[in-house]
Image (cartoon, rainbow, N blue to C red):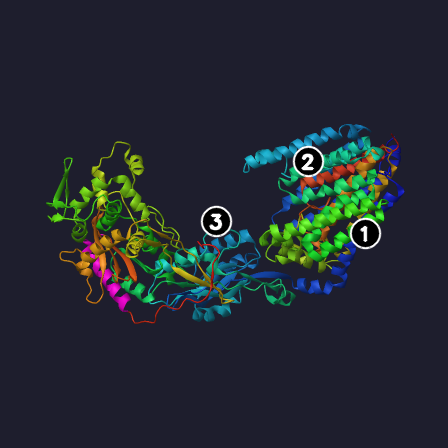
């Protein structure tokens, strides 16, 4: 099937033909470019080159549950420089003009040079229009210096909502390496909050503009009449479940404190308010942030950047007794006929565990109502470690809630295995359990977890994944994308919840209830106080609540660090928030527009 | 004596053409790195050209049978080196000392091309023509496929594709029927056609069917081949449209047409085109190229070195370069006809086609005629390993010429 045609004359001819065709093809194309179209390319090169200008997309806006704008963009002017075209002797006068450090200018130029000496690198973002117009004239005298309009975040909400929204800031060198090739030095990127967790959705896509630029760095026109340009794509808008007014009130109630408030809509798991104190002004970061402003926030001992609502894991005190109560009632270990006589103390081993006062003979309802520790010490020994741990996990403790914010603390829900690991096997006694029964010791929870816990009690066991974003709106097409959140039902009987809810009602409204400070004349509030020992000072005050009792519209957790009694310091805050939210006359929440379910969870 | 050698055995034409191309290379690298703190490249380029000439002459003076006898040995060594690069290169990515030992990472794969040409030629010379059946074609494919696979795993797609320019031309020269060559080439063309578009795919499949009927005496054979090719086309259509993710499709599109990615590959391609196009008939003068001197063209001393020639010497400079290459290729073909051994003849064709492929693709990617796969322009692009292997190939041609009358 093969010719013995090796090296034949015909094949010689064909091989030479291929050589000629290949080289002629190149020559023809070269001739077309260099002779026929030389003018076209020549004009591009004449004076001289194309330069790629990156156009930043407009970042998406953020709205609250009533459609009020919380964050949008304002124009600000930015100065950038092309390292190759910039003369080093210009640094000093430029630094003076921009009121910047020469070392900072040098550092930025060096950083940009690594990417390419021909791409502009951002020197100074966020120059106000006033400053800009006064220096614009002088800026033109520098070669390789450009200025462009760059959008800047502005915060229009009544609340700061700093820990929800987070802030945007110029990308750091570390993030540049971590986030991949889309980002370039000088880009604005979400650092914390929703700005970070929804970064890829909010940011949009950059555009590219090609300019013809001459040797002195002056723009002489568009390349290819702009036909090669790629337009920017605007970022999508976020519509939140947050109630701006409630959020603002929560923040004002926490002023001067270290603490947190998380309020949820118990029917959806949507976050109505999520406040952490002390807070900060996110607008400090939009545009140009000076080193000292940044340092003062980072080095503040009260850590204003730290989101206590989702990241502070602390012992929850007596609010945690409902875990043990759920376990005992669900597993029918006791019923409400089982009583304990409280004399104000409980001797276990050779140690006395205290109660605030002698409560006399109490059953489980009364024990919750008056927050009797002795009852729960006894109950813990009856229920046992394993069952208690199982119910704690069921309520979501020791795990991240999956809220759409980064850096959530899972807290600690101790188990026998955990104790064996940290204390060593046989190096801990049942006495350790007694502290756990009343939410002290090794157990730690975040305010968000506690809010989810009270939400699922209010709901008869429906546990919704807490979330802040209700839907995403594509700014160009107007298309709505609903983000999908999980929900589950706790395997606990209705009559158990009936008893616990009843006890919580009595905590606020009953005779001798510890949460009377949250009582409202026109709304039936149910709650539970907590006062947790804090080794670094006064007790932490906790309060969890939901209202109205029959058809809950709000479930919340309040925590005030080193304040004192939960009833004194946390419950009044909850009361004010419930009063505001239940009686608010503002427009009803924005009707949910028709949309599709987003394909994937975002963060 | 020396004069006789010069007259009888020294192919001064080939040598002269290679020296001309090497000189163009030195000038271009000088311009590309002029005044940019990369002067060491220029010095090193001269050193490598010198080493190359020395090695070429050494090969020329070596004995008649040395190349043929050591072809498999040479091949085995380069395969081991390729394996070594793969294993050691992965394990000690940051460990540069042994890489320094080998020069550059690419060195074994550059030498492996030459070794593969010699090994394939030796195999076909011994099992050639009338003995050439499907089984032997399989072995031949294996000889080329092994270093090709190892190169692909580096991964170096550009150099991998170069092996195709070894395999097909040598088989063709060995006497393989045109229809078999066409049938072997068909899948590759189908793949490229599919990435270009469905219309191009259909036209390509039809064109192959016509070719099969023209080239085959047995109509049934032609029909069968046409069906196989059409089936492969259908599979590719399914694979590309259904199995590949949109972002994978986009990556292939950008590979074939860099203009779709103005931020990345397209930016390089655009700058290269502007540089060359603005050169005009006689160019802007040596060291006067604005685009290249202002360092707008990336990798302008390696993959995009032709922009320097195009911008500074214009169409005239480009044409002279092309003529020098063309004359060198014709010498290669002429030597393939002159030599008495089949091994030498097949090797000469292999060398010629590999050089031609490099020239076509490298200049092609500078002028938007070929995808940007990053293979060097022979003798001209800076790169020690590539310059050395170019001169080794010249040395082999010179050796063949010197011994052309011997069996």
Q: Is residue B11 above or below residue B302?
A: above
CA separation, marks 3 and 1? 54 Å
Mark 2, residue position:
B146
Side of A244 where A599 appears, left or right: right
Q: Nearer the viewer, mark 3 or mark 2?
A: 2
Quadrant assignment for the C terminus of chain B: top right
Q: Can residue A59 be seen in this snapshot?
A: no
Residue under mark 1: which chain is it in? B
Percent from the top left, x then y, of residue A181? 53, 52
Q: Earlier in the sequence, mark 1 or mark 2?
A: 2
* Viewer-proximal residue among A62 and B401: A62
Secondary structure of residue under mark 2: helix
Local crowd size for mark 2, using a 10 Å CA cut-off: few (<14), some (14–19), many (≥20): some
Percent from the top left, x then y, of residue B255? 65, 52
Secondary structure of residue under mark 3: helix
Quadrant assignment for the N terminus of chain B: top right
Q: For residue A149, which numbered disc appears in the image?
A: none
Percent from the top left, x then y, of residue A310? 33, 53
Q: Can residue A75 be seen in this snapshot?
A: yes
Side of A388 where A517 appears, left or right: left
| Residue A578 is inside the magenta segment | yes
Q: Nearer the viewer, mark 3 or mark 1?
A: 1
Residue under mark 3: which chain is it in? A
Say yes or no: labels 1 and 2 on the same chain. yes
* Viewer-proximal residue among B339 and B231: B231
Mark 3, residue position:
A178
């Amino acid at each position: 099937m093969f010719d013995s045609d090796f090296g034949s004359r015909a094949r010689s001819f064909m091989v030479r033909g291929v050589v000629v065709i290949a080289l002629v093809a190149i020559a023809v194309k070269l001739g077309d470019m260099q002779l026929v179209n030389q003018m076209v390319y020549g004009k591009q090169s004449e004076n001289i080159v194309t330069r790629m200008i990156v156009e930043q997309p407009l970042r998406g806006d953020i709205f609250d549950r009533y459609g009020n704008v919380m964050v949008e963009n304002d124009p600000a002017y930015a100065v950038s420089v092309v390292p190759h075209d910039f003369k080093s002797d210009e640094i000093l006068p430029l630094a003076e003009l921009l009121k910047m450090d020469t070392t900072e200018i040098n550092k930025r130029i060096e950083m940009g040079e690594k990417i390419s000496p021909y791409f502009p690198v951002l020197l100074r973002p966020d120059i106000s229009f006033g400053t800009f117009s006064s220096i614009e004239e002088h800026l033109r005298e520098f070669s390789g210096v450009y200025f462009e309009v760059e959008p800047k975040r502005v915060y229009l909400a009544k609340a700061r909502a700093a820990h929800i929204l987070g802030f945007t800031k110029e990308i750091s060198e570390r993030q540049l390496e971590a986030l991949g090739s889309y980002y370039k030095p000088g880009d604005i990127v979400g650092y914390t909050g929703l700005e970070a967790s929804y970064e890829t959705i909010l940011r949009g896509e950059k555009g590219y503009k090609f300019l013809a630029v001459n040797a002195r760095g002056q723009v002489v026109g568009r390349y290819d009449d702009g036909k090669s340009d790629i337009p920017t794509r605007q970022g999508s808008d976020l519509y939140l479940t947050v109630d701006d007014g409630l959020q603002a009130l929560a923040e004002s109630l926490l002023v001067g404190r270290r603490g947190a408030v998380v309020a949820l809509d118990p029917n959806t798991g949507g976050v109505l308010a999520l406040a952490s104190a002390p807070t900060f002004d996110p607008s400090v970061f939009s545009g140009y942030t000076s080193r000292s402003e940044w340092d003062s926030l980072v080095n503040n001992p009260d850590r204003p950047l730290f989101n206590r609502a989702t990241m502070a894991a602390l012992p929850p005190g007596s609010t945690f007794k409902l875990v043990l109560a759920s376990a005992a009632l669900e597993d029918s270990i006791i019923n409400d006929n089982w009583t304990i006589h409280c004399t104000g103390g409980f001797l276990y081993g050779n140690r006395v565990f205290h109660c605030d006062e002698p409560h006399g003979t109490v059953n489980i309802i009364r024990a919750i109502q008056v927050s009797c520790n002795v009852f729960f010490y006894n109950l813990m020994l009856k229920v046992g470690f394993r069952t208690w741990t199982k119910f704690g996990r069921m309520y979501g403790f020791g795990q991240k809630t999956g809220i759409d914010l980064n850096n959530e603390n899972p807290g600690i829900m101790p188990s026998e295995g955990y104790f064996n690991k940290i204390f060593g096997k046989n190096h801990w006694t049942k006495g350790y359990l007694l502290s756990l029964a009343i939410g002290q010791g090794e157990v730690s929870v975040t305010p968000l977890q506690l809010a989810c816990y009270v939400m699922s009690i209010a709901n008869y066991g429906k546990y919704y994944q807490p979330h802040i974003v209700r839907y995403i709106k594509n700014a160009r097409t107007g298309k709505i994308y609903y983000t999908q959140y999980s929900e589950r039902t706790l395997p606990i009987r209705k009559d158990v919840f009936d008893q616990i809810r009843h006890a919580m009602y009595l905590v606020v409204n009953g005779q001798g209830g510890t949460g009377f400070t949250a009582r409202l004349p026109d709304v039936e509030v149910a709650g539970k106080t907590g006062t947790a020992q804090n080794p670094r000072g006064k007790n932490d005050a906790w309060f969890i609540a939901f209202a109205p009792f029959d058809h809950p519209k709000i479930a919340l957790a309040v925590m005030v660090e080193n304040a004192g009694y939960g009833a004194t310091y946390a419950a009044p805050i909850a009361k004010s928030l419930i009063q505001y939210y239940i009686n608010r006359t503002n427009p009803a929440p924005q009707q949910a527009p028709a949309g599709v379910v987003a394909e994937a969870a975002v963060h | 004596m020396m004069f006789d050698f010069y007259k009888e055995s020294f192919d001064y034409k080939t040598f002269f053409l290679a020296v001309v191309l090497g000189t163009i290379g030195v000038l271009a690298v000088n311009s590309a790195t002029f005044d940019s703190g990369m002067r060491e490249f220029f010095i090193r380029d001269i050193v490598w050209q010198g080493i190359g000439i020395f090695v070429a002459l050494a090969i020329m003076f070596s004995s008649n049978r040395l190349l043929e006898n050591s072809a498999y040995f040479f091949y085995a060594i380069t395969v081991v080196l390729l394996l070594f690069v793969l294993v050691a290169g992965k394990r000690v990515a940051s460990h540069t000392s042994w890489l320094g030992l080998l020069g550059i990472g690419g060195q074994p794969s550059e030498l492996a091309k030459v070794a593969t040409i010699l090994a394939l030629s030796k195999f076909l010379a011994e099992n050639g023509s009338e003995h050439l059946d499907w089984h032997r074609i399989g072995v031949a494919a294996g000889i080329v496929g092994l270093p090709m696979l190892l190169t692909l795993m580096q991964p170096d797609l550009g150099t991998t594709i170069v092996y195709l320019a070894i395999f097909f031309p040598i088989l063709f020269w060995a006497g393989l029927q045109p229809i078999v060559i066409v049938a072997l080439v068909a899948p590759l063309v189908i793949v490229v056609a599919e990435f270009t578009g469905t219309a191009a795919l259909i036209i390509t499949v039809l064109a192959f069917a016509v070719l099969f009927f023209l080239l085959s005496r047995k109509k049934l054979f032609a029909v069968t081949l046409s069906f196989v090719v059409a089936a492969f086309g259908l599979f590719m259509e399914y694979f590309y449209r259904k199995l590949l993710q949109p972002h994978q499709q986009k990556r292939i599109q950008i590979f074939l047409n860099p203009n779709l990615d103005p931020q990345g590959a397209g930016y390089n391609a655009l700058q290269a085109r502007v540089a060359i196009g603005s050169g005009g008939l006689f160019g802007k003068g040596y060291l006067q190229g604005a685009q290249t001197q202002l360092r707008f063209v990336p990798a302008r001393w390696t993959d995009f070195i032709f922009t320097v020639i195009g911008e500074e010497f214009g169409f005239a400079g480009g044409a002279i370069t092309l003529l020098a290459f063309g004359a060198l290729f014709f010498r290669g073909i002429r030597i393939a006809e002159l030599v008495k051994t089949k091994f030498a003849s097949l090797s000469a064709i292999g060398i010629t086609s590999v050089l031609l492929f490099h020239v076509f693709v490298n200049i092609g990617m500078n002028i938007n005629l070929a995808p940007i796969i990053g293979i060097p322009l022979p003798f001209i692009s800076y790169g020690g390993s590539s310059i050395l292997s170019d001169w080794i190939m010249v040395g082999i041609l010179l050796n063949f010429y010197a011994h052309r009358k011997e069996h």
